[in-house]
Amino acid sequence: MTTELRRLRNYINGEFRDAADGRTTEVINPATGEAYATAPLSGQADVDAAMKAAADAFPAWRDQTPAERQKALLKIADAFEERAEELIAAEVENTGKPTGLTRSEEIPPMVDQIRFFAGAARMLEGRAAGEYMEGLTSIVRREPVGVCAQVAPWNYPMMMGVWKFAPALAAGNTVVLKPSDTTPASTVLMAEIIGSIVPPGVFNVVTGDRDTGRLMVEHKTPAMASITGSVRAGMQVAETAAKDLKRVHLELGGKAPVVVFEDTDIAKAVEDISMAGFFNAGQDCTAATRVLVQESIHDEFVTALAKAAADTKTGMPDDEDVLYGPLNNANQLKQVSGFIERLPAHAKVEAGGSRVGEKGYFYAPTVVSGLKQDDEIIQNEVFGPVITVQSFTDEAQAVEYANGVEYALASSVWTKDHARAMRMSKILDFGCVWINTHIPLVAEMPHGGFKKSGYGKDLSSYGFDDYTRIKHVMTSIEG
């Protein structure tokens, strides 16, 4: 007997719709490897309809007062809290994440972030009005950019959706959001919630694959394209958007160095780093997965980290003892496995290094030592529960190794020496430097990287500013 799959639909102009041509894709639960739903494989007609709805809704939404937009966002935050269990269930089915951790680690920050941007809507900043030329008064207007085409990733479908729509709506823009083709369920539910609060066309969702995303970025209507994804995807978006000079916001890959000096409390560092490396199966651009340890404590640290990995559990969402669930999809399992299979002879797998079970896409918490700076697994993002360990001699070599990758999103320094921490935070070429911690984020502080990790900021007033444009108005005051 075949179980009937749930049907997800696009949300366009206040209505749920199938793809215009009826095409769909199956959505797989990564914890089981089995399909549980279908989602529209949206094409040109669907993207056209969503963009038209967003463009038609833009003038009225733009012209609402900041207080009115704030009120709507606060209602959205309240509704997310009220329907938290539905959102959690959808996200767990999307991703296979542990239910308890999704409840405790994702819903509260999402709600807080929406409320932060609700407040940001009423805190527009600009130069003071004044007479910078005799007889003329200048003022600065901060305005929304227009329709925003947004593409969210599969590692945090709900939270990354919030990072995109909340500042955009707060600033007065309208949105067409596409979730990953592997994780549409929670985004479709968010559309139902948000759509009950904002006018039709202000928030739209189209599901689909890479071609759907490409159609969104190519479309003439959006003034801005925002993507969280791979470096390759970001480059393609930037290239496509450049053809008509769309504004682009990119949050791409990471390869965060975790620099551990010999004066560190090893037990505390191992506990925190293993958590920050294995959380969400390492599927986090800021994950603590590239550890650099001063040679005098290297062996002791590796032994302790390997034990922490052995004590870390992966498993099904309803198991309260697990730290993380499966990798998101079969391709990601293949990618992570490939990195381990291609390890050079000088590398040593200290823990893990294999798939767990035959059902779903689970991978064991893994630690690899003995690596060199030019090894593939050091230079490229694994995006899985794999922590690599390198040894360094002194501060100069630590900096050389840490900065010696093409990514520049996040980093951390572990030391009791305040002056050293300050020197390292100055010279590390990453958008974030944590000291004696790794991975905490707050709504008030910016998140975003340099180099091939992209440009633009999420969260904070800087993230809000990215969804605005600046206009200078000058008027004669001499009659």
Image (cartoon, rainbow, N blue to C red):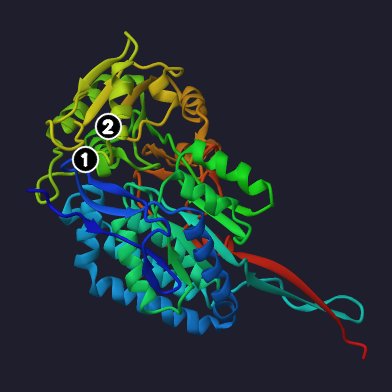
- Residue under the image location 29 percent in, 28 percent down: 334
Q: Which mark is residue 333?
A: 2
Residue furthest out toward the left: 1
Mark 2 and mark 1: Cα distance apart in space: 9 Å
- Residue under the image location 57 percent in, 74 percent down: 56
Quadrant, the C terminus:
bottom right
Q: Name the residue under label 1.
A: 326
Residue furthest out toward the bottom: 479
Q: Is residue 283 visible?
A: yes
Q: Position of residue 217 (x, y in %)?
A: 56, 51
Query: Cβ–Cβ below 8 Å for labels 2 and 1?
Result: yes
User: In the figure, is residue 248 to the left or right of 397?
Assistant: right
Foreground residue among 275 and 228: 228
Q: Where is residue 471 in the image (x, y as percent from the top left)?
A: 73, 70
Q: Position of residue 386 (x, y in %)?
A: 28, 30
Task: Name the N-terminal-most of marks 2 and 1.
Answer: 1
Question: Which amino acid type is shown beneath numbered disc 2?
Answer: Leu
Q: Quadrant of residue 200?
A: bottom left
Foreground residue among 93 and 419: 93
Q: Can residue 442 be seen in this view?
A: no
Label 1 CA crowd tier, 10 Å (few <14, some 14–19, many 20+):
many
Label 2 CA crowd tier, 10 Å (few <14, some 14–19, many 20+):
some
